[in-house]
Image (spheres, rainbow, N blue to C red):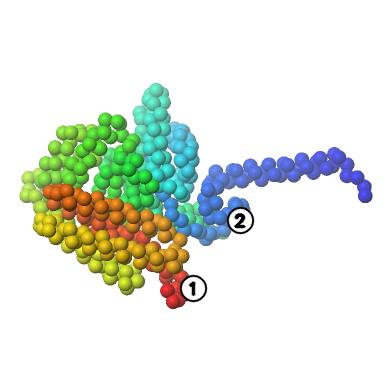
Amino acid sequence: MPMIPNSFAGNAQDRNDALRERLSTTTEAYSRFVPREFLNLLGIEDIRRVEVGQQVERKMTVLFADIRDFTSLSESMSPQENFNFLNSYLIQMEPVITAHGGFIDKYIGDAIMALFPDSPDAALRCGLAMLERLQEYNDGRERAGYRPIKIGIGINTGIVILGTIGGASRMDGTVIGDAVNLAARLERLTKEYGVAILISEYTLYCLDQPDLWSIRFLDRTHVRGKEETQSVYEVFNGDSAPLMTAKQRTLKIFEEALAHYHVDDILTARERLISYLSQVPADDAARVYLERCAPAAGGPGNRRVELASNWKEEYSFGKDGLDVAHQNLLADMHALARAVNVGAWDLTPPLLAQIESAAVHDFRIEEQLMLDNEYPFIDLHTRQHQRFFEYFGELRDEIALGEENRVYLGFRIKRLLTGWLVNHILSADRHYGHYLNSRRRELPDR
């Protein structure tokens, strides 16, 4: 057999090395437009194998961050200055997100949409780190003679669909679902209240260590396309040390004022907000609420405690036994709210015991059904059940210790019990119902 000249073999090896390097750099270049993490979640190793319609359903924490008043800021800059400014800001934020286990799904003008596949705690740590990096960035801007900027961050946790959409010649990776819409809504609300970070109740339920964070209830808000309201929470660890300490010290006073506002007792809400602001004058969110109370300052207060929602047919998800159990549980919560509203304290212990017993029984049945049907999101569902019992325990202790503010307690029942149950049914239970329907042909006896 003739020998292959060393120069020929060397040239072939050089060509192979060059080809591998070219493929590597090409893949690296593509990953700057389509995140490698996104492809990994889709189970795709080679970007050349991406096709329209590939999708996967995942629990995900979604983070939206946006520059405040960017439109007015950009009006004072040329197009080139706009691009330079945006890129200088985004370059600061990208490594912070990556360092906390997230990845940027897309840039939307001056907004960042980032995804965290593993932990909502990581998303929260990332949000606080972004605020710290922003402070460093602003220090540099001020030294250069530019004004500092502010950002707002909205975080929500839920089940989303990751996939590819588009046509034959142009496609894109995207994430869709109610969880994305609510995260975007939360980011917009940060501007309204003058706060840095807002999270949803779903993220609060899913936190591994909620006690590590300084969190307070801020509002109940409607999300486009949804009838029921969602509880919104401020995370204020990023505030200055004096302001954070003051908010922690006055947490209950603030929530009592908001409770009166949300049940239309506007006069009392206004009085309490004025008293609160005398202690925490730098609280922008409290000032927003006080401004809302101003038009009603001269009229009579409406002392109507907001009770539980009545059962609606839309709360049903197709399992007759569980639908009836949910309906009875909601009725018991409604009865507890009425008892608190009229001061019938002797009725609260048996009602609390009945609610706890029914919840234990109903949730156990749900979780067993999910195990039997191999529901992939049982851990997320069970976590929400665990959080319910934690909040139920807090409420039971408040009643047992003789909390006298009936409006405050009534609103707590609405927020921690009935609001939790309705939103749990409409999100978590409904998703499980869709999962069962999708398996009906495969498992007709279930």
In the rendered image of this protein, does residue 6 appear above or below residue 333? Answer: above
For the point 41% across and 57% down, the residue is 379
Residue 392, position in %: x, y? 26, 54
Residue at image position (73%, 42%) is 17
Give residue 49's mark: 2
Mark 1 residue crowding within 10 angstroms, few (<14) / some (14–19) / many (20+): few
The answer to which image quadrant residue 89 occupies is top left
Q: Is residue 185 visible?
A: no
Q: Quadrant of residue 315?
A: bottom left
- Foreground of the two, 45 or 378: 378
Answer left or right for 403 relative to 205: left
- Residue that appears at 41% across and 60% down: 378
**Residue on which disc 1 sits:** 442
Q: Earlier in the sequence, mark 2 or mark 1?
A: 2
State the CA–CA distance, disc 2 to disc 1. Answer: 29 Å
The image quadrant where one finds the C terminus is: bottom left
Residue ID at (33%, 57%): 385
